[in-house]
Image (tube, rainbow, N blue to C red):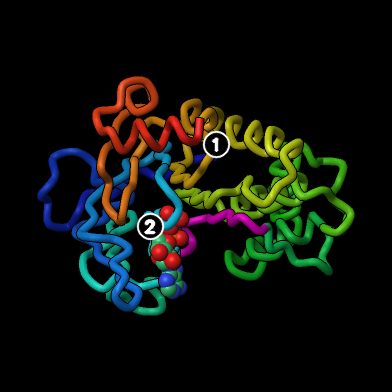
Amino acid sequence: MSVETNKQPADGTHSGPAPLIRLEQVTKRFGDNTVLDHLDFSVDAGRHVTLIGPSGSGKTTILRLLMTLAKPDEGTITVDGEQLFPASEKQIREVRKKIGMVFQQFNLFPNMSVLRNVTEAPVTVLGLSKDEAEARARELLDLVGLADKCDAKPSQLSGGQQQRVAIARALAMRPQVLLLDEVTSALDPELVAGVLDVLRDIARSTDITMLCVTHEMNFARDISDQVLMFDSGRVIESGPPEKIFGDADHERTREFLSAVL
Ligand code: ADP
């Protein structure tokens, strides 16, 4: 699986490649509730970044903004050099093609086979032929350990298997970025490890950029290049996993980790 090289920004303000994702001074409010407060961060292509922090600190909202499922009140967001807000419908569609998202709930199409769940969007959105889409889907279902379930319906699979189909479905669009929103939270505990193993594999064997919201701290430690600790809509601390999990600067980070680890 390949990730395109980043474009240089048009204004030439950076000497190196532009980050694939950039949030600048992003503020999001719901009524009086300021959920993201002048947030800045960026993610370079191919990096694996994990967002951790207490419930309600704004992590999922960031993924939703990137998917254009919500709009910021202030600030700018760019993906691969394209600004998201304001953007035309066509620009939004183009940006969405670059991003795959896997949610807590798997949201598979219940009446379609596993294979068809994975081929549907590549055929209808990307215009792949059925044969091309099926070949790619079989490869991906093999990657997530479900090569033998192509003809099954989602209801015949365990939650963990359904989530692995959802991961294959997201990858089938050949996104540059994979957004993962607490993808194991809805699973029975015994099914969590299988899904995390698949994601570890993808992180190791592909050059896809990953942005994960997770409460699975061992997973975050294993796959992350960078961990961002959120509190009340701000990043209070960020760094490599060894630093955040081993020697965090902030008392709030240490408190949070001691409560969840
Ligand atoms: P996290 O992912 O860190 O748990 P969220 O981004 O889901 O946090 O939520 C941050 C805050 O935004 C919470 O206080 C939540 O109640 C609020 N929020 C999220 N989505 C909405 C919405 N659609 N309407 C109103 N409030 C929302």
Residues shaded magenta: 96-105
N-term mark: 2 or 1: 2
Pinpoint residue 231: horizontal percent, then vertical percent: 32, 49
197 left or right, relative to 218: right
Q: Which residue is mark 1?
A: 216
Rendered residue at 54%/31% (across/down):
219
Circle 2 crowding by C-alpha within 10 Å: few under 14, some 14–19, many from 20: many
Pinpoint residue 209: horizontal percent, then vertical percent: 44, 42
Rendered residue at 50%/26% (across/down):
222
Q: Quadrant of residue 5?
A: top left
Q: Relative to 225, is 75 above or below?
A: below
Looking at the rendered structure, the secondary structure element under dot 1 is loop
Q: Which mark is residue 58?
A: 2
Q: Quadrant of the N terminus?
A: top right
Identify the amino acid type marked 2: Gly
Q: Quadrant of residue 45?
A: top left
